[in-house]
Image: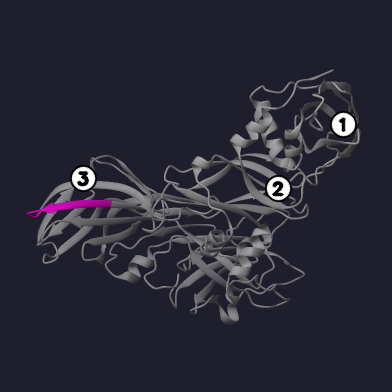
Amino acid sequence: MLFCTLILACNNQDSQIFDEAKEGSPISFRAFIKQATRATETTFENGDAISVFAVAPTSTDVTLASSGNYADNVCYTYNGRSFVSGANSIAVSEIDAPKLAYYAIYPYLSDASNKFQFSVKNNQGKYADYTASDLCTAYVEPTTSAEVLLEFGHRMSCVEVKFYGENLVSKKIGVRLDNIYTSCNVDINADTYTATGTKGNVILGEHSSDTYQAIIVPQTVSSEQTFISLTIGGKVIPLNLAATMDFKAGKKTIIELEIEDDKVISLNGYTNSWNDDECVDCEVVPTNFVTLTDGVAFDFNFGKNVSYYYYGYIEKDLIGSVTDDEIAEAAQEIFTRYTPEDGMLGYVSGLDANKEYYIVSLGYDSKDNRGEIIKTLIKTKANVTNRPRVTISDVTYSSTEWNWETTISSNTKKYYMSALSGDYASVLSEMPNVWLAWYMKDGIDNGEYTPVLNSDSWWMSRESTDNYVYIYAWAVGGDDEFSGELDTFFGSLVEETILSSRSANKNREVGVVSKDSIREYMKNVVNIKK
């Protein structure tokens, strides 16, 4: 079953695929924030307002202009379920813009545009001033939905100061950050947030009895200047960082202070995810892609804290209708759990040539905290025309040999070929071509295959008891691009006759296969000769 179908089947009614917008119908927005910081159970609170821009794409260009977009800086307000704008709502015109891309900014800013300046509040002792400093942005690719899902990301940096020590609760504590930038230049298209202006101070708000927080502009702070002014019982203690530190967008920096007799005896700082139950360095990133006409195979790069992971795929048109939490819930219910030590190769085959897909991968640490969900857009080679081709034909056998012919197309520069004889040939023939292609490409890159330049006749040894043969070849064009298809031949001897099946790429499936097991199969590859 399709990953996207399974996800949607596990969700409640609010999470179903959104209806398409009809001519003149108003657009509304559901929204969530990655690693949300809101104190309430919902991601946003009633009355929160956002700036929304709509762009009618021209060809592949969906760049946000300074003005003259399909809609500019429309104020949408949260009503407890979604963001709406009443009479000012963006409306779809099937003639002018059947699909619209959306840019959104939290909080609503009257001067928001594709480029603007944003400042955090100097005193974040009140929760409203803390959240007003929490600049978040979202982008949605062109869609026809009447209710659009906005996935916001934090663009500022969170600083949390935590205290340890005895009798601190009874003392009046104040925390202020000194010598920091409080403004930044925002470029929405470039997704950059560059500190600017003069340096100032930010007062942290009390998050709990021993924890204080503030949101600041992403920047680098030197150890040579006072960074924290700590007030305990009326006494001010200036503190420097032990080393220069980067305060990164979308991350939280936690500074731990141990206090004894109104003195700081230790200071420790480290970067964490914005939300405490999120895992830093838990990303599972697909890499080393090999692509055929109907599928892809790939390896994984793992963050250093990944203990286990899941992966699947979802249609591109549906990615905007499910939240990260819904994806994670479905993945845990439906898909097999793997660990980095399993050494698995991921693959997806049988994809629809007319659709695009995302590989969705998510990792967890040993405490079951989830890292960032990685969504990787994949495209097959289904629509590639005039692809190179090598064809295997005229397979015969004797008591000691398998024999066959290869023929190449005029636009084929070279090809790579191998074959197996015996029971392993039968096993290999049942596997998706796309992971065989991945292993071939890995071997080609490591010099394990010799390129063939011409059509030719071939033979390889056969034991008298070998009843199966599997031959496979992969063509390369003049542009050094591999074909989107392997040519494969599986032969089975029944009553001394070759019953063959030329296997096209396999049926739709998603899965993993051990790289060690692939190599075990391939150890049995036999030498073939002209």
**Mark 2 and mark 1 in contact (Cβ < 8 Å)?**
no
Residue type at tag 3:
Asn
- Where is residue 492 shown, x and y percent of the image? 84, 36
Per the image, label 2 sits on a secondary structure element best described as loop
- Which numbered disc covers residue 240? 3
- Which numbered disc covers residue 46? none
- The majority secondary structure of the magenta stretch comes to strand
- Where is residue 1 shown, x and y percent of the image? 69, 60
What's drawn in magenta, residue-wise?
255-262
| Residue linked to disc 1 | 392
- Where is residue 97 shown, x and y percent of the image? 72, 66
In the picture shown, does residue 360 fall above or below 97? above
| Cα distance between the residues tagged 3 and 1 | 71 Å
- Where is residue 28 shown, x and y percent of the image? 59, 74
Q: Tell me if residue 261 is in the magenta stretch.
A: yes
**Mark 1 and mark 3 in contact (Cβ < 8 Å)?**
no
Task: Look at discs 3 and 1 and give the one toward the viewer.
Answer: 1
| Cα distance between the residues tagged 3 and 2 | 50 Å
- Which numbered disc covers residue 379? 2
Residue type at tag 2:
Lys
Mark 1 / mark 2, whichever is N-terminal: 2
Considering every residue shown, the one lying at the far left of the view is: 261
Q: Quadrant of residue 95?
A: bottom right
- Number of other residues with Cα within 10 Å of mark 1, as a class: few under 14, some 14 to 19, many 20 or more: many
Q: Nearer the viewer, residue 213 or 41?
A: 41
